[in-house]
Image: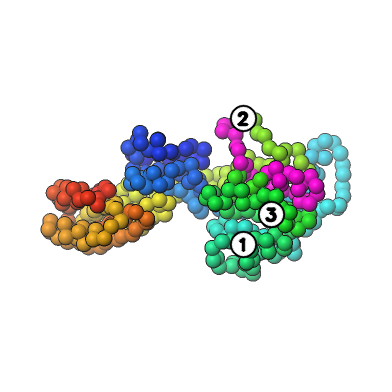
Amino acid sequence: TMVGIRSNTKITERVLDNTDLSAIGAFCIGTNQIDLDAAARRGIAVFNAPYSNTRSVVELVIGEIIALARRLNEKTQRMHDGVWDKSAQGSHEVRGRTLGIIGYGNIGTQLSNVAEAIGMRVIFFDTADKLAHGNARRMRTMDDLLANADVVSLHVDGRTGNAGLFGEEQFSKMKPRALFINASRGMVVDDQALAAHIKSGHIAGAAIDVFPVEPKAQGDAFESALRGLDNVILTPHVGGSTQEAQEEIGYFVSNKLSNFIDAGSTELSVNLPVVAAPALTSGSRVAILHHNVPGVLAAVNQILFEHHDNVLAQYLATRGELGYVVADVEGPSTDECIAQIEATDWNHWVRTYNA
């Protein structure tokens, strides 16, 4: 049994206790809505789409940088109010400006490339060692980045340690009249502190796509300290919401689920040991999720030997307390062989596949 969810559906340990799932497909980037450890303990594979909406998020951020620099939000509102107000006051080109990217992962690196292509200087900060793309420069600390960036854009993940990452202290360290963008996670930013710095004029504008508390359903009321502020773009978590991204997410996650169910491949699973098992072209396959203890591989090979299963290829990996062995054998595996593996104290589950 499989289930597919989006970001608002919660899969807790209690839910898992009352289901018989083999796999969960998160048709989005984040997996914070799933109890990954509880799923792993039950041998349930979880897959997401870490790359599929990268371009969509990057294009939104680039558009917001230009819109904020030209104060388009205010200008279009004045026009809708029937006021012709042609002025260059407060409008700037982004060419030659410095973009500071916090979080240099899939989205951060592609944003770096596109921003550089339109003439921006790029600096970045990441807690992990990351290769700089193009002419981007790595900053040793976040404070160094904040002191030098004309635009700060957040692209960090939703791990617990990132909660409250950006607040009063960080806004105070930004350059006067800098711009701020958050298209990562709502819980990362203190919106009250951001609102105060916009009202004071220290921050010249902001674009926010994610919020600490978001409405649960379409049409629900939205409350934020940022509503009604000048040169602030608010969007309802649509960074990855393009038709192209949604189509790619659907294909990507369903393909990973299919490969797991049909062939035992855990490629890009976020919680089980990752084994990118190729398509099975002959014979049969025995896939074993087991406790990560010494001697399992030797025991598996001994059992296969005793049942005259000639091993053609083997793939294995471990992750935390779990290990995963995939063995391709020449002929069909017998029920007796599988039963012997299932009877061991290290076995979690065993599954078979035929070419």
Distance, label 2 to label 1, CA atoms, is 36 Å
Label number found at residue 125: 1
Number of numbered markers: 3
Mark 3: which amino acid?
Answer: Gln
Question: Residue 16, position in %: x, y?
Answer: 38, 38
Disc on res. 170: 3
**Residue at the extreme front:** 169
Identify the residue at image location x=71%, y=39%. Answer: 225
Residue 225 visible: yes
Q: Which residue is mark 2?
A: 220
First of labels 2, 1 by sequence position? 1
Residue 258 seen anywhere in this rendered image of the structure: no
Hey, what amino acid is under mark 1? Answer: Phe
Q: Residue at x 75, y 64 (%)?
A: 96
Query: Quick one: 322 or 133, which is closer to the camera?
Result: 322
The CA span between labels 3 and 1 is: 14 Å
Quadrant of the frame with the N terminus: top left
Q: Where does the magenta region start and end?
A: 191-217
Where residue 147 appears, x then y in whole percent? 72, 62
Spatial separation of the CA atoms under disc 3 and disc 2: 31 Å
Q: Residue furthest bottom?
A: 135
Taking the magenta stretch, the answer to whether it contains residue 274 is no
Relative depth, front residue between 105 and 333 = 105
**Which quadrant holds residue 84?**
top right
Which residue type does callout 2 highlight?
Answer: Asp
User: Residue 72 location, x and y as percent?
Assistant: 77, 47
Q: Earlier in the sequence, mark 3 or mark 1?
A: 1
Residue at 54%, 57% in the rendered image: 106
The percent position of residue 304, horizontal first and vertical second, equals: 17, 58
